[in-house]
Image (spheres, grey):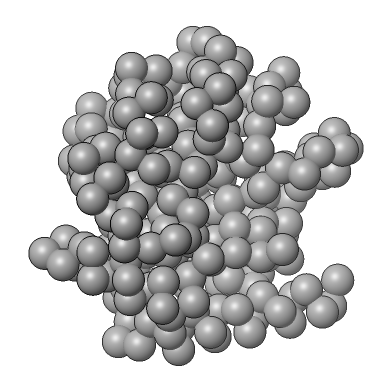
Amino acid sequence: MFKIAASVLSADFSKLGEEVCAVTEAGSDWIHLDVMDGHFVPNLTFGPPVIKTLRPVTSLPFDVHLMIDNPDDYIGHYADAGADWLTVHAEILPHLHRTLQVIKEKGMHPGVSLNPSTPLSVLEYVMDDLDLVMIMCVNPGFGNQSFIPASLEKIRRLREMITAHGRDIQIEVDGGIKISNIATVAEAGANVFVSGSGIFGQLDYQATIELMKTKLKAVQDNT
């Protein structure tokens, strides 16, 4: 099933709670929360305290994407803050299998994110431990970037890997997802679509999300 995950990275931070409520009412399926530390990526955002304050304002799943140097030190904090899905970067973790096990033990769905230049082969021996793989379609660190076209082939190959493995693993895409390309990305095999400026950069959140879902339904009807 296709899902839209509204990324608050592009929201108005002066009224973050209101923005989360707005996209909840507009029909988003998940709330995507980008955590950046200024080291792994060249930007800073927020951490567990902010996420915890947002947890009471929506019942939607919190999809937390850690772009930080030391995710192992904070897994418990994000569980306590209310994360439902916790995604870590393969590029930063020497013991990826162990990290995924800890995320699962803390009651969250474990995910792995891959930067544009990171090969799918890093997933080969952790497929049994994954609930989600996030394909970065831009280089992480900033919102409002353009989708990298080569991501489509990577998504197709990942879908083939998952089908061959026989597990229900979500393929999430993050970066440059908008009304104009969401159907093409869905056809490649993705099923969770992170959109920041593609939603928050529009005047009417509900109309935008509804149009995205209409395009996704057309893809679903044709498969």
**Residue 45 appears in which quarter of the rendering?**
top left
Using the image, determine if residue 74 lies above or below residue 56: above
Q: Is residue 87 rendered to the left or right of residue 120?
A: left
Using the image, determine if residue 107 lies above or below residue 162: above
Q: Is residue 117 visible?
A: no
The residue at 43%/80% (across/down) is 26
Q: Is residue 38 visible?
A: yes
Using the image, determine if residue 102 lies above or below residue 215: above
**Residue 190 appears in which quarter of the rendering?**
bottom right
Q: Is residue 123 rendered to the left or right of residue 134?
A: right
How many numbered discs sit on the rendered protein? 0
- Residue 148 at x, y percent in the picture: 50, 55
- Residue 110 at x, y percent in the picture: 57, 33
Outermost residue on the left side: it is 14
Using the image, determine if residue 79 lies above or below residue 174: above
Q: Locate the N terminus and report the quarter of the image it occupies.
A: bottom right
The residue at 60%/64% (across/down) is 3
Query: Between 120 and 166, which is closer to the camera in this rendering?
Result: 166
Query: Between 31 and 121, which is closer to the camera in this rendering?
Result: 31
Outermost residue on the front side: it is 56
- Residue 83 at x, y percent in the picture: 42, 42
**Residue 48 appears in which quarter of the rendering?**
top left
- Residue 95 at x, y percent in the picture: 52, 10
Q: Is residue 177 rendered to the left or right of residue 192?
A: left
The residue at 56%/22% (across/down) is 105
